Amino acid sequence: MRHWLILGSGAVSRECYLPAFRYLNALADLTVVDLAVSGDLRKRYPQVEFAAGDFDRFLDSSHQCDATAAIVTLPNRFHENAVLRALEKGMHVLCEKPLALTQVACQRMRESAVSAKRLLAVNMIRRLFPSIRTVVQMVRDGQIGSLISVTMEHGGPFSWPAQSLAPFLPENGGVFADMGVHYLDMAEMLVGPLELRSYRDDFCGGVEADATADLVSGSGTTVRIHVSRLCTLANKITFLGTEGRIVLGVDSFSEFDLYRPVDGDGVRVHPVRPFPSLFLPVSLWGCFAWQVQRFESRIAGGDVSTEESESAARSARIIEQAYCARNAKLRARNPAPVALEPAPALITGATGFIGARLIERLVECGVSDLACIIRRPQTCALIARFPVSLIPASLLDFEAVRKAVHGRRYVFHLAYGRDGSDAEAITLRGTENIVNAAIESGCEAVVILSTINVMGWPDGEINETAPYRPAGGSYGKTKAVMERWCLKAARGSGGTRIVVLLPSCVYGPGGKTFTELPAKLAGDHAFAWISNGQGVANYVFIDNLIDALFKAISSPRAHGQRFIINDGWTTWREFLTPIVSPWEAQIRSYEPGELGRILVASRRGALTRALRAAASNADVRRELKHIPLSSVARRLALKVGLLTRVAQVDAPSPPDAQNSNTPPMWLEDLFGTYRTRFSSAKAHSLLEWTPRVKLEEGQQISVEYLKAVGLRHA
């Protein structure tokens, strides 16, 4: 084993290469270089030599070690420089995909490798999946006849454990460059060079998160690639031939399904020999271990072929064409009737449902200097599609908050403590930090988002003069304390206006609790009406709420005020029927308390089902913790740990939970028999706010969204 140098200690190094080297018992032969190396990583791999610093300086120093092979795992924008420098130092190089985002850059690296007589390889790891290698061989052997088409779908909410914002920087490319390149490579392996026919993505000036490309080979085989960091797709690859088809799961290492007339309903195929090295595990990092072995073997054999860099250049050409095509089609957006004067703005809570739509509307208004404080890079896929500055910071760090707020005219504070031991502190002290920093920086206005939960659920029509009766446990209580502090701070805020908005049940595209959740429950036969759905639903469409945010932040009359933002009220049945109508015939009605009594009768099974019904979606789990649980539900939940376990359950629902006809007990608390009607008369009068999108239109837009994301059919 030769000495290896890894440039970059990010997720692919942590999750793949370092475990692979450990399995190969070669950690002592490894040096890892990065600007910063975490103490945790050093503790996990004490045999590895870690060097903190810039890779350029490291390669220039006298301490560059005796490495003869380098692995480049840096962000895409650094690939060319890192590869060229390593080749210049006489190293063979294995570079993570994509080799580069331009054909010219790939060609420069290829020429440098040829000149240096060194091997330049590209880690297209999916080529090494045992299932992929077997499928490729079967297709080449004609086992499904001549290949007609290849369809590749790979998508789901972004979950790669990135610790930086690199995946969301335009210079590194988006999902098409990141994941699509795997499938460009795979298709070319089968059908040869490809030509791009059409391309579309959701690019809005930032980094695309959903992309579809249609291509064709010289022999006429069509290829469709759909990749997404947002939507859960089929996650299948289908190879259609004249005499059959092969269907493969995108993350399946060792099996796939073969359908041919001679096979009846199809057969499941398992590769006989997954790896040439029999001791390697059939797993992702097993494939990485084999890649290291292959690269070592090629170097030992004097292999300096350029096929991989040439293939990378062809893929880069297609990526360039795709990005050029979408950039040319990026059209000027028509601003909504309610707009905001463009000015530097800051948003907290930007990655949520409301925050993401707020960003989109601000961009439509022409706001070009837009920054967002974010907690975790993994949550940024949706908003990184726009030209925004992403600022990783804790709201509890006043200096970081002050730096983010400086120079901003508007501040939209949507964030609150959703979970974790610091949830209350984020809602309270985080808000104080934002408001104090805005006052200190001389911002024109701050709008803070609260909730109608602070007013509770008394019968009848109420307005902002009603007393605080917080509902929803600590969520409502903490929001009420936050509101009082903000209104007090407004009395001494100088030239900075402070406004608090209390939205009702926000629904619309991307909405979890009042849009996606009912459809998910109904699709799992776990939805029910309470008292035939005759309880009062107070609702506000997402765009109407954004209009109110714009009105509040630009109105001098709004300073020091709180406003209920509510489109109106109707019954839960009228509000939710368009969403759950495909399952309406199977939806039962329960009387108040009936679901709780069913739970008492079969506590363990029903409670488990209630937990599992929400377990598949982290956003929904967090919402459940803010529901004002009834006394029966709360006692049972506390007794068996529901209120703490809801945030921990991540397993998919077992078969018996999916087939259960007993809905979860918390439906009564969420869509129950409350009779409160929240009045927005003050917002109509002082803010001159009127809901533009009426209920019927908002429901139709929501239904179309649910159809688009696969949560509802016709």
Image: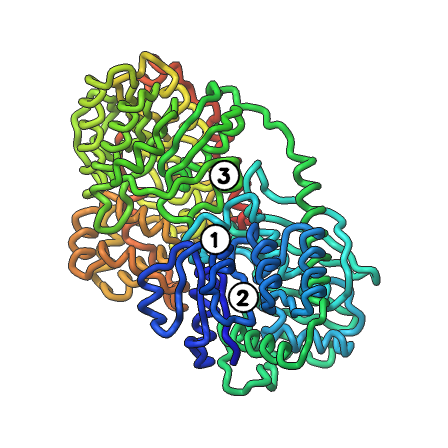
Q: Amino acid at mark 1?
A: Pro
Q: Nearer the viewer, mark 1 or mark 3?
A: 1
Q: Give the mark, 3 or 2, whose residue is nearer the N terminus.
A: 2
Q: Which residue is mark 3?
A: 702
Residue in the picture at 38% in, 25% down: 407
Task: Tell me the kind of residue under disc 3.
Answer: Ser
Determine crowd level at label 1: few under 14, some 14-19, many 20+ residues with C-alpha closer than 10 A.
some
Regarding mark 2 in the picture, which secondary structure is present there? strand
* Position of residue 426 measured from the top left corner of the image (x, y, whole percent): 25, 41
In front here: 382 or 511?
382
Question: In this image, 686 relative to 491: left or right?
Answer: right
Count neighbours of disc 3 (C-alpha within 10 A) and say few if under 14, some if 14 to 19, many if 20 or more. Answer: many
| Cα separation between marks 3 and 2 | 47 Å
Mark 3, secondary structure of its residue: helix
Tell me: 234 left or right of 487: right
| CA–CA distance in space, label 1 to label 3 | 20 Å
Give how far across and how far down residue 668 sits, in percent: 28, 46
The percent coordinates of residue 459 (x first, y second) are: 22, 30
- Name which residue type carries label 2: Ile
Occupied quadrant, residue 351:
top left
- Look at the picture and state if 98 lies above or below 496: below
> Where residue 428 sits: x, y (%)?
21, 36
* Coloring scheme used: rainbow
Q: From this viewpoint, is residue 203 visible?
A: yes
Name the residue tied to disc 2.
Answer: 71
The residue at the point 50 percent across, 67 percent down is 5
Which tag, 1 or 3, sits closer to the chain's start? 1
Question: Which label sits on residue 157?
Answer: 1
1 or 2: mark nearer the eye: 2
Q: Are marks 3 and 2 in contact (CB under 8 Å)?
A: no
